[in-house]
Image (cartoon, rainbow, N blue to C red):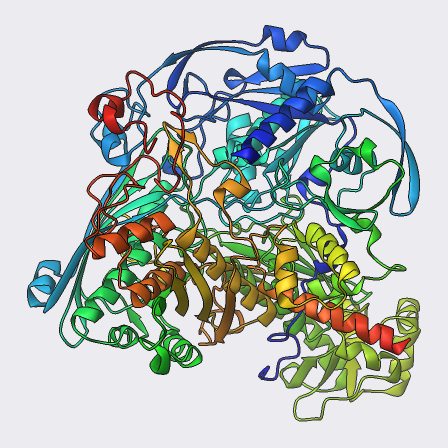
Amino acid sequence: MNNGFSIIGKRTAMVDAAEKTTGAGKYTDDISVSGMLIGKILHSPYPHARIRSIDTSRAEKLDGVIAVAIGKDAPNPFGILPVGHDEYPLALDKVRYVGDNVACVVATSEAIAEKALELIHVDYDVLPAYFDPEESMRAQADFIHENKPGNLEKDYHHIFGDPERGFSEADEIAEARFIAGEVTHAAMEPHSTLASFELDPHTGKTGRLTVWSSTQVPYYLQHKLSLVLEMPMQQIRVIKPLVGGGFGGKSEVIPLEIIAAIAARKAKAPVKITYTREEVFWAHRGRPRTIIDLKTAVKNDGRITAVKARVVQDGGAYCSYGVVTILYSGALLGALYDIPNIQYDGYRVLTNKPACGAMRGHGTVNVRFAFEVQLDELAARIAMDPAEIRKRNLLKPPCITVNGLRVQSYGLPECIEKTVKRSGWEQRKGKLLKGRGLGIACSHYVSGAANSIIRSDMPHSTVNIKIDRDGGVVVYTGASDIGQGSDTMVAQIAAETLGCSLARVRVIAADTDLTPIDLGSYSSRVTFMNGNATLRAANEVKKLIAAAAAKKMNYSPEELIFREDIVFKKGNPQPLPRKDDADEVEVTQAGASVSGHVEGQILRGSLQQKRKEEGPKEWMTFEEAVVAAIDFHGALTGTGSYAPPLEARGGKHKGGGVGPSPAYSYSAQVAEVSVDEETGEVAVHKVWAAHDCGRALNPVSVEGQIIGSVWMGMGQALTEEMVWKDGMLMNPGLLEYRSPSSIESPEIEPIIVESIDPEGPFGAKECSEGSLAATIPAIANAIYDAVGVRLHESPFTPERVLAALRAKKKEKALNLTEGVDPTSPKRFREHGGSLCFKGRGPARHALDPAHRQAPASAGGAD
Amino acid sequence: MSDLLATLFHRSMRIAHGLLMKKELIPLRVNGRTHELAIEPSALLLDVLRQELQLTGSKRGCDDSSCGACTVLVDGGAMLSCTLLAASCEGQEVTTIEGVSEHGSLAAIQKAYGDWGGAQCGYCTPGFVMTVKSLLAENPDPTEEDVRHALSSNLCRCTGYNQMYEAIRAAIAAEQEGIAAK
């Protein structure tokens, strides 16, 4: 099963599991430093307004308030993308969404800081606001950003192949509008940052800055802090403690992280700011509400001839990752199936709501929902099994897709085959009781972006390894473990490569002073890129050890095998470890292995002396080999780095840099649901999810990632949605947002498919995001199988399901969702419509364009 | 909606009282040790644990008792420390995640959560472990349905709960084996 590996492929508890299960591990908010003060941020109550003045004098006079920071304290713009430097940590002259950051109070306690916020007076000049992307695009004046006319952040228009010809050759064409509601990460740990300055011993003035932050991207944070604070990067140290989940929400620098540093500089003391759960919802950066006009054509044999997609994303008030998101939406139409002709028109639109950014399955999820549902419809029209139509459109790798994506390993056929088999698709599909159904869908995702967001030739990951005389292996990696288990992955790869036990390896990660640069934990890049860098660093050190060990053993270095803490000759049977280490070999987690009294001898040098007297050895322990290597070479260190190969970096067209990846993961899923036709309620009973992760380095983690992705997709499919009303979030709490609890969560059967990628570390690829996108359409298709209605708007709330059922039966609409026909909605509500409001909600501003155009429906469903 | 009101109420309580109230000396028994603490009568148990006693294992994931990350045991029963006054625990035995490890080694449930992938980011884990502790104290051999019901008081965004069930099953088996061995 484990292909001759001793560590790779074994079910392994995470190296930091005990820290987590005992509560001993420190997350940012758990850290305190002496003299630390608490910061609280004042947020804008208006969705769009100019700031005339800010008066902080009353707040500053409150006992216990140390400082109040405002925009002028650091008037430099930033943003995660070099093309999107459009936000300020604290607003300079304008606020652009309810929740925008206006001022920060630093006080001796949270209660005093909260009180002081009430004493800050801000004079606003309220502007008309835009909440609907299509309305926003028609704006003539009062643009959200002056340099973005028509509130258009960015649009792309791509044509690959000959879509017109593709459509003319087709036997069946489906065309429809799909809408995916806005969802957010809601990671369990609210964002938190602690910033502390030191005094410089030479100048006597404020010197180095240390920042602890809940981030997926410590190096980007270091870079943005340097830009905004006008400090050299080497004067800034960013430390990532344990992070309580990210899902993309911590994959960019959010204003909070810089505000803490500005506040610390102004207060001349360490400052910690931790968001409340409500503030996390306002800070957002999740998956945008997306409108997809999709047209797909197939021939009667099931082959897809052309796809045309027009995608509009409701991006919120700032660029964030938006330009990348809208490009992913188009680019990832490719590389799953063989589609010869693609037309894509993408619009990223600004609105007066919190910025949307990257979220698990960045850019691909909503378009994949639309595509997989439409493909199911087309299969029904040509009377083909939905699993079969997917098999008819497989790629033939190695290949480069029509839009320039290089595909090598491709486990999709096996994924489809295995889910179909395990779910009993062929025997059960269409034969279940009324109201119960099965649906299938596929998806894929990148294993890291082949092009970094900051264009440069630098490697995407670098890893250093140091081994000392104690035989301990220390790996210095910039990889950011956010709960996905990257520290464990790094330790496993180092241990497997060096042939030592896992317990020898200590991982020092994500500290900009200690660890070499790594771009961060996003776009599922860490296993592929940091894993490869670790592999290379370990191989470099291993070469040094092998040279010295070979000398001692009178073999050539190429003949040596490193395995389970023993170095021996290829072809010889692996020597049994000595008696006192025997029980250590099985249990790699428990304690250091070949240490104890042997170690003492090594430190005194007596063991080498003994060895010398004994003459050349048949085999050596890892520790003996390490000592020999240090005696021979001096310091024992190695370094490895990874940059994606040129061939994988994509086409030359405008925007062609987003989408290419050195490898793609694949997923096929079958969902079994039942639909209550009386209430419209959908229950998911089971999801079978086969995921091609290249090679499962740690099956427990891979399965955990697959289950977690499918589960999060299910949340988006059925219950999760950010509900807006006049720019106000109506459900900024974990219960109101309706993240599924254990009661609503189905059994998810993860099925690992290993396609062994030629370039991945030990063949590994992505496993944390690719499965999410297939779940939503698999559930939609299962609902169709159960009750015969196609849902084109997510989440599939009871209201939407009921409306579709009644429309199918030609019954009078219940008008629970403003009478919008879910199969072909003609207009878009600014809120999702899945909640029924009593009362009026906050008053709409008189100048609001929506107010002028449709006063009758402005109140929503009240 | 009631949760929203609860949040607002809770927050206004903190603002209104946090600034005005005088501190009182309150004896609090946590993980078998008694601490004499000068705290405001309005202080929440979670804040006292985290800030006064530096027991940061209990987490704040929300502010309105919706996520369960702050779950502790008060006289053996699972309680949400984010909406519990510390002063109200006077005379009761509070157990936090820091008090779960047995004789310097991981309790069966802690080991199992690690082995079976019950913890990913780990932020919700202390709360879940406390919830499971209280469930197993009441019902040493729960059905899958019982487990699902008990866990629904806590939220996790990483695991989809599936691997937690395996962990709990493994922990129960390990406990029973341990008892049998004695």
For this rendering, which residue is in front, B140 or B58? B140
The part of the image, by quadrant, that contains residue B36 is top right
Q: Nearer the viewer, residue A648 or A361?
A: A361
At a point 93% along the width and 74% down the height, the residue shown is: A606
Name the outermost residue toward the bottom. A572
**Picture quadrant where residue A9 is located:** bottom right
Q: Position of residue A515 (x, y in %)?
A: 64, 50
Q: Residue at x 57, y 43 (%)?
A: A215
Residue A281 vs residue A844, the one in the foreground: A844
Q: Is residue B171 left or right of residue A171?
A: right
Residue A110 horizontal/vertical position (percent): 68, 24
Above or below, A824 relative to A635: above
- Left or right: A25 with respect to A377? right
Residue A479 in percent (x, y) is at: 58, 54
**Figure quadrant of the C terminus of chain A:** top left
Residue A160 picture quarter:
bottom left
Is B62 left or right of A693, judged from the image as shown? right
Q: Is residue A656 visible?
A: no
Which residue is found at the position 75% from the left and 50% from the top? A23
